[in-house]
Image: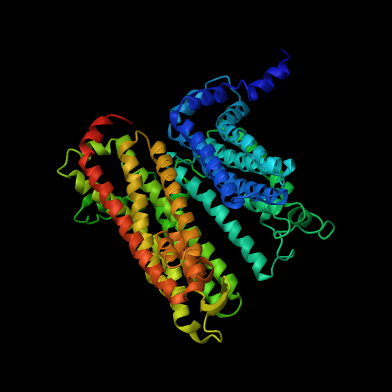
Amino acid sequence: MPVILRWLLRLGPTNPIAVRLVQNGSRRTRHMLIRSGYLAALIIVLLWIILTKAGSGDLDYRTLAAVGASSFTFIAYLQIGLICVIAPVFMAGAIAQEASPRTWEVLLTTPLGPLEIVLGNLLGRLFFILALLFASLPLFALTQYFGGVPGKSILASYLIASTAALVVGTIAIALSVSRVVGKRSVFFFYVAVVTYLAVTIGVDSYLRTSGLNPNGPGVTAVTAFNPFLSLRAMLSPSSYPTAPVGTFTGIQHWLYTRPVATSNIGGILLSLVLLIASTFTVRAGGLQTLGSGTSGIPLHRRLFRLGAKGTEHRPPRTPWANPIAWREAAARNASLPKSIARWTFIAIGTLFGLGLVALYHTDTMSASSFQLALVTTVTAELGVITLLAITMAATAVTREREDGTLDLLLTTPITPSAYLTGKLRGLIAYLLPLLAVPLGTIAFAGLYALTGGLGRADGAMIKAVALAKQVTHPVVLPEAALLLPVVTIPFIAFCAIVGLHWSLKSKGTLGSVVTSVGIVAAVSAFIGLCGWNAGSGMPLLGPALAGISPAATLFAMINPAQMLSSTVSDHDLMSARVALAIGCFTGAGVYIGIVYAVHAALVKNFDMTVRKLAGVK
């Protein structure tokens, strides 16, 4: 075999790291369940769309083509969303690998070169994501039987999804070989992906509605940087058009005229840059000593006069009645970076929310743009906090089992009920200041609308159409200050108890995080879609069902005419608001009941579960 061919094979198909990852991952039940769930979700959604769109009776070819096109569009967006959720799951192992330095010590003693190590880790984990994509290809091909779905669009959608997965994978590998993050930093990886997608979508919507976009209501400068927006530019050329050829030149030509090609090429180039950087970093000891002086103290610790790690001396603090709750709430801010990150989020989020109201008050932002910005901001913040709640809860017990702290706690007089109650209470206490940011933003906007916009000419009111009926309502319903916290805080408690459940029953941190995120994501998507469809399609009962979901409640508080259109059209806005309030309190009761039931079950089986997993690290 030629030497060059052998070298190329060792970079890819015969790379020992890639082969090991693929073989081990193929034997894991969790990976099989993820693949099965992925395909099942696509199949169920496709059948549901076809049955609901086609209806009954004879159909002509035009109708079948429209059904096929709409089905493909929805499935394409769903596939991008699932890839953005699943890709971090498969790539999280690369980040978690840094938590065991001995793995790197052994790996660096092998004859493998830097490029082989980097590509082996990337291809071995990226294989499962690409396998998911190609496994769903026959499902996409079926939509062509209906007509209206060109094969070029199918292949282009797969290219966008593959590029997105490649970028996520190379970022994870770069974080892994830099060795500046650990296993528990997987959460920040999730948060970064979700936040980036939400922010770019929000910026795109604001540019198109505010008149600041050079391309009018078409693609914007951020379209090429978000896979959802790139897919929309390809699938919806009439409602989201690209700029005509010749309108722009240079970089603007690529951004406004060819956003899909820019997205794919840019993603590949970014991946190459990260791979090259990782190749130079992997054998150089990572970036863990960057900025360290001769004393071995990192630069950021020397700037704040913290000394070497583990030598800080803080004044003693008085614990709460439940020491577990105090430890869970206080220990999360034990380090300076964590404290800075937390209060930076609170400060920036608060100022940004106040800034939105100020821009609307000074007529810098229109009412519709203000509503859009408010929905995007609060949704993104709640999404980040929800992920934080799940991850913190999912690592609350497994972390102590891995470092041996749980064994020490079990020798104290602390009962299982006090232990689990303290964990839950401490997590909620830690998250409440963070929740105050989105809830405070929506409350301030609601109070601003309640006062009539502090003398605005339009009284902070907006005209909207609910089906065939025109209504005038506040830009934000004033009761949002009460109802959104009523349903959101119990929902966060529900997320925390789900994380605690799997943290107690899982062997490792990564497994508990992945399982908890998957369960909460599935439940949230189900109640969110049901609430959204019921709110707009069912009079009276629809708003009550929408109130169970925090996301649907948020949209209903800001766009009641659209979200609660059937009730507003058949009755009036007040009836819809009352029904929504009833739904919020009902949803809060349901979440609290679930939390209580799961907590009771965990307390009952605590000793048996802990004994079963004793010694597991």
Coordinates of residue 105 in the picture (x, y in percent)? 48, 26
Percent position (x, y) of residue 143?
66, 42
- Quadrant in the picture for the C terminus: top left
The residue drawn where x is 20% and y is 48% is 418
**In the shown orientation, is residue 506 left or right of residue 446?**
left
Residue under the image location 42 percent in, 59 percent down: 549
Q: Nearer the viewer, residue 86 or 299?
A: 86
Quarter occupied by residue 10: top right
Residue sitting nearer the eye, 571 or 366: 571
Left or right of 453 in this view: 116: right
Q: Quadrant of the N terminus?
A: top right
| Front in this rendered view, residue 302 or 606 | 606
Residue in the picture at 36% in, 44% down: 394
Please tell me which residue lies in front, 317 or 121: 121
Q: In the picture, residue 469 is in which quadrant?
A: bottom right
Position of residue 187 in the picture relative to residue 502 (left or right): right
